[in-house]
Amino acid sequence: MNFKAALFDLDGVVFDTESQYTVFWGEICRTYHPEHPGLEQEIKGQTLVQIYDQWFSGPLTPEQATITERLNQFEQHMDYRYVPGFRQYVETLRRRGIRTAVVTSSNRPKMEAVYRARPEFRGLFDAILTSEDFDRSKPDPDCYLKAACRLGVSPQDSVVFEDSFNGLRSGRAAGMYVVGLATTNAAEAIAPLCDRVINDYLVTVNQ
């Protein structure tokens, strides 16, 4: 691949955090939707707005503030472990002059927790775009198009790294090369939305 910019989602792509979110949302879903076992698996990759609109609207709307507060507190104490090989890979890209960015639906308070846990994090990227920077959420391509614009590259010269169905669709709709990480969903499930599927970055570090 000859590209000028690499754009990374955060959870399940930079950090191996999806299993932690499964625990959190499992507790929430069992509390509010005991009639729907396994709901925490169905909502993987969705933004908080999408989850609320579909599962916590109507009579449950007043509960959104409580859930958001619990989520904010949970994110302040998460274990932000890099996906295997990620740090080496992104450092290799930067040595080669490739621009890098994080494009995440996470909010700024969560990112402050990331910066505390990983002081080196900001130095790995030329730009970090959060939910506050977008008008429309994934699967809309808005976030990735804005990231490419900020980095001064064209979509055709950009590669997206994503793990969720909505994120993969967003990268593809932006007209970018899409690499899917099988960290959250099975490789065969995400393959139709990707140009390439990887399990982690160890295979790419020496390429």
Image: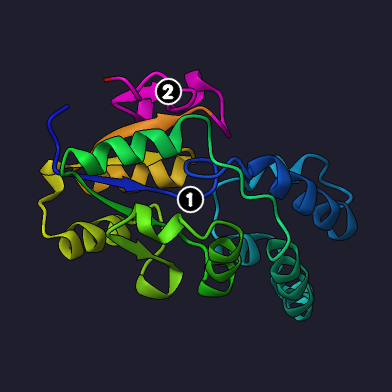
Q: Nearer the viewer, residue 160 or 35?
A: 160
| Residue 102 in sight here | no
Please, what secondary structure does the residue beneath circle 2 have?
Answer: strand
Q: Which residue is mark 1?
A: 10
**Residue occupying the point 42% across, 67% down:** 130
Label 2: few (<14), some or many (≥20) within 10 Å? some
Quadrant of the image for the N terminus? Answer: top left
Q: Amino acid at mark 1?
A: Leu
Which one is earlier in the sequence, the residue at label 2 or at label 1? 1
The image quadrant that residue 196 belongs to is: top left
Determine which of the numbered discs, if any, sits on residue 185 in the image.
none
Q: Residue at x 30, y 42 (%)?
A: 160
Query: Can you tell which quarter of the image residue 96 is in?
Result: top left
Instruction: Tell me the element at label 1.
Output: loop
User: Is 156 in front, or is 8?
Assistant: 8
Q: Is residue 61 magenta?
A: no
Q: Residue at x 41, y 62 (%)?
A: 137
Name the spot of residue 182 as percent of width and height, x first: 51, 27
**Residue 23 point in image, percent of width and height:** 79, 46
Q: Which residues are magenta?
A: 183-206
10 Å crowding of disc 1: few (<14), some (14-19), many (20+): many
Q: Is residue 1 above or below residue 110?
A: above
The residue tagged 2 is 198
Amino acid type, callout 2: Ile
The residue positioned 10% from the left and 51% from the top of the image is 154
| Left or right of residue 203, residue 153 in this image | left
> In the rendered image of this protein, does residue 156 appear above or below residue 46?
above
Marks 2 and 1 sit apart, C-alpha to C-alpha, by 16 Å
